[in-house]
Amino acid sequence: MSNFTVKVIDFMDRLGRLKKNLRTRGLDALLVTQPQNRHYLSGFRAGDMNINESSGALLIPRRGRPLLMTDFRYQLEAEAEAAGFEVLVYKRGLLDLLEKILAGKGIKRLAFESHYFLHQTAAKLVNLAKKLEIEPVPATGLVERLRLCKSPAEIEKIRAAVLLNEQVFQEVFQTLRAGMSERQVAIRIETLMREKGADAPAFETIVAGGPNGAKPHAVPSERLLGKGEPIVMDMGLVLDGYCSDMTRTVVLGEMDETSRDIFRLVRAAQLAGIKMIRPGVTGAEVDRAARRIIAGAGYGKRFGHGLGHGVGLAVHEGPGLSPRYKRKLKAGMVVTVEPGIYLPGWGGVRLENMVAVTEGGCEVLNTDTTFLEL
Amino acid sequence: MSNFTVKVIDFMDRLGRLKKNLRTRGLDALLVTQPQNRHYLSGFRAGDMNINESSGALLIPRRGRPLLMTDFRYQLEAEAEAAGFEVLVYKRGLLDLLEKILAGKGIKRLAFESHYFLHQTAAKLVNLAKKLEIEPVPATGLVERLRLCKSPAEIEKIRAAVLLNEQVFQEVFQTLRAGMSERQVAIRIETLMREKGADAPAFETIVAGGPNGAKPHAVPSERLLGKGEPIVMDMGLVLDGYCSDMTRTVVLGEMDETSRDIFRLVRAAQLAGIKMIRPGVTGAEVDRAARRIIAGAGYGKRFGHGLGHGVGLAVHEGPGLSPRYKRKLKAGMVVTVEPGIYLPGWGGVRLENMVAVTEGGCEVLNTDTTFLEL
């Protein structure tokens, strides 16, 4: 669906960087269970229905050919998508197959993804490892760290997802009328995403009018949209594996003075955040630059979440733009900048764009300016 | 959306049965993290975006008022939905809040859901428990076991989901034409589900024509549907929290002799399975009754998955109808019966109905007979 193809050479580069990492840490292999990590390293695109219904795992040894283990249902996709991987099909589950594979592979220290591995499965892995005289090593973020900085081809994929998202938003916005229900609008958005070629929505679309907008994660209800109230529309899609995430808050008919002031404040905070984004600045510093504007106007307690988060194969990934994120931004990172003000009983205003960190500063990937310039 | 309301008294009954279970096992409290278990015990409906982005956890002490711990984003929903629960909001995550709560509660043995708890989080919980002189006890299936047998009100909710699913299928089936793409049909199905009031699709809809039908978990592609080929349509929805799951395989235009034979065989296997379902029979026995028919015709290796699975708040839950499930069925269980034959290069035929186990045998919840009676 995109012209910006991730080539075999990209996968080789990714595996190469990971293997170097394994060597540095004295690890002989990594078992990869996290779905986006699996996709990033192998090209195998299937997600997990949930963590209990995995579509497979990778075994990346420090030396030699990597393996993709999956079940009967995914075998054909796995063989077509994971070039360079040996595909093995398990019948009695991953651990049963692992037992056969690990014996005689010379693996002494086997890392597994502690942040996407069930306690129950880990207990079984520990037993198996003991039997095979292998040391199981909980590891976290080994692959996520590689995913933080996107290649130019990845950024173009993300940009394509952002632009498609804007098309969907504009088409729905043009037909938005008072009297439509939140649910009706959310359904229209998600249907259009798919019709225009998205793999899927990236998360459950939020359409929250009036007081419902005070809930940052509102579920679209049967409530009818009214004139003059702020309507928060938060939507994201997956295109060719990569995500977008975008929020606009819109008003039908006349906007009152209060709303206008709050919109301007949130937008000013967003711009202050974006202005701060460049390599070498921490996520906390960017968050602070935006938060200061909102707090300065007395709404500090009404902005209860972080300023933004990384986006890539996952719609929520590193880095964070939040008071707790002390690491420095680097060129190639892609983040959302989404300040909001939430007033119980009245509603909310949240504005969200996506930004790529560049060598010289940053680039806003969005082009849509609806209700940003008041 | 339904007339079959789950009442406060049902939640009290569920909590009562769980607490009795805790007493029997010498456990002082259970930490509930699994989303459907959380919903089942408290009424709090929010799902998890994924296991890393939990919308909350319950703490059910053997004595005293149960707690729901969530974050700022879900506070309003939690307070409205979880009647009888004390709602606490965490700012620095669940474990930080747990540390404050657990101190001085007299809890000596704290169970957690090992099957829906990350290894990483468990390691932190173990540390915290050590500090508080609490014994953490991995537990699995304590709540799932309660969910196996549905109450009459729950079965009516499931029936409503099944019937809505059939309406959606019929509406799409009536307009199905050769030349439509698989994707286009899948989008139409999921849009109609939502328009007709479903909470959401229960899983990614499968529409797989011709050879694509040989992949039991095919992703709808741009391939156009052709005349005479089997088209597998597997779809499920969530209505008022409860799931449906239904598969029909259809043919546009003339059906050839081979197809007709395979359809009849799969249907015969389905009927043989259904005939076997009653209290006291094991899931393996039901699976065997159906599998025998397919294997007897020489297609045993072409039916690579289990015959069926339980359905309720989750679309895949216990009991299993598969060679490995040795426990006995009981009245109130609800299962799918979905034999299939998959021939690489040709395609697949899968037929799936949902069945409730009754005191005297079973009741098929589906009414739609499209391509079942050939």
Image (cartoon, coloured by chain):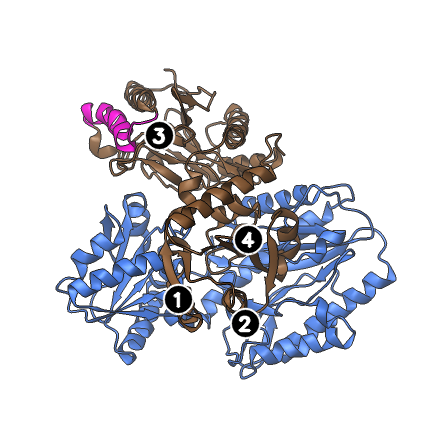
Chain colours: A brown, B blue
Q: Is A258 or B141 nearer to us in this picture? A: B141
Tags 4 and 3 on a common chain: yes
Residue type highlighted by circle 1: Gln
Q: Nearer the viewer, mark 4 or mark 3?
A: 4
Rendered location of residue B177, percent (x, y):
77, 44
Q: Is B273 or A90 nearer to us in this picture? A: A90
Question: Subunit of mark 3?
Answer: A
Question: Subunit of mark 4?
Answer: A
Calculate the distance from the C-alpha at mark 1 to the C-alpha at mark 3: 39 Å
Residue B372, picture quadrant: bottom right
Q: Secondary structure at mark 1?
A: helix
Question: Which circle marks residue A120 in the picture?
Answer: 1
Q: Nearer the viewer, mark 2 or mark 3?
A: 2
**Mark 4 = which residue?**
A66
Which residues fall within the magenta stretch? A279-298
Secondary structure of the magenta portion, mostly?
helix
Q: Secondary structure at mark 2?
A: strand
Calculate the distance from the C-alpha at mark 2 to the C-alpha at mark 4: 33 Å
**Mark 2 = which residue?**
B320
**Mark 3 = which residue?**
A350
Which circle's residue, 1 or 3, is located before the other in the chain? 1
Which circle's residue, 1 or 4, is located before the other in the chain? 4
At x 24%, y 55%, the residue is B95
